[in-house]
Image: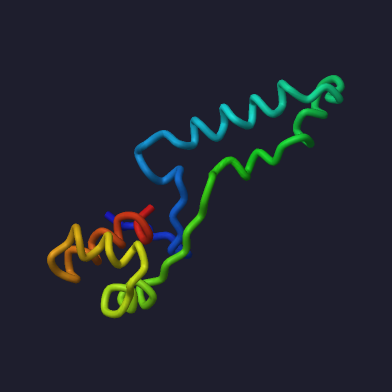
Amino acid sequence: MSRSYKKNPITKDTNTNRNSAKFGKRTANRVIRNQKDILNNGTYKKAYCSWCICDYKNRLTQAEFQREWETGTSNLSLYLHGHFKSFKQALLWWKKYYRNK
């Protein structure tokens, strides 16, 4: 069985299991309903970009991840060292969220 991987190591809020894409869609629908200048039929599509529903997008390559693990004082580095004992465990976390589909 073959495995597929992402071409770009990007994670979005829709990749997590928190259903945050549902919140983004609800917000987009609220914006559409509150606009008064929307006419008939398909003009609502021009009011809000349907592909911009995710709140954030984060790109982190494996080299950047390793550099962050070794020498970093950012919030990501503090999270990684607080939750994982070794780089191997942290790399599995990176693959889960940034590399696998």
Q: Residue at x 86, y 25 (%)?
A: 37
Percent of width and height locating residue 69? 27, 73
Is 81 above or below relative to 51?
below
Can you tell which quarter of the image residue 86 is in?
Answer: bottom left
Can you tell which quarter of the image residue 16 is in?
Answer: top left
Q: Residue at x 63, y 31 (%)?
A: 28
Name the outermost residue toward the front.
73
Q: Nearest the camera: 72 or 52?
A: 72
Q: Residue at x 27, y 54 (%)?
A: 1
Can you tell which quarter of the image residue 80 is in?
Answer: bottom left
Is 54 above or below relative to 76?
above
Judge left or right: residue 51 versus residue 57: right
Percent of width and height locating residue 10? 46, 59
Q: Nearest the camera: 71 or 100?
A: 71
Judge left or right: residue 1 versus residue 7: left
Is 15 above or below relative to 97?
above
Percent of width and height locating residue 61? 41, 71
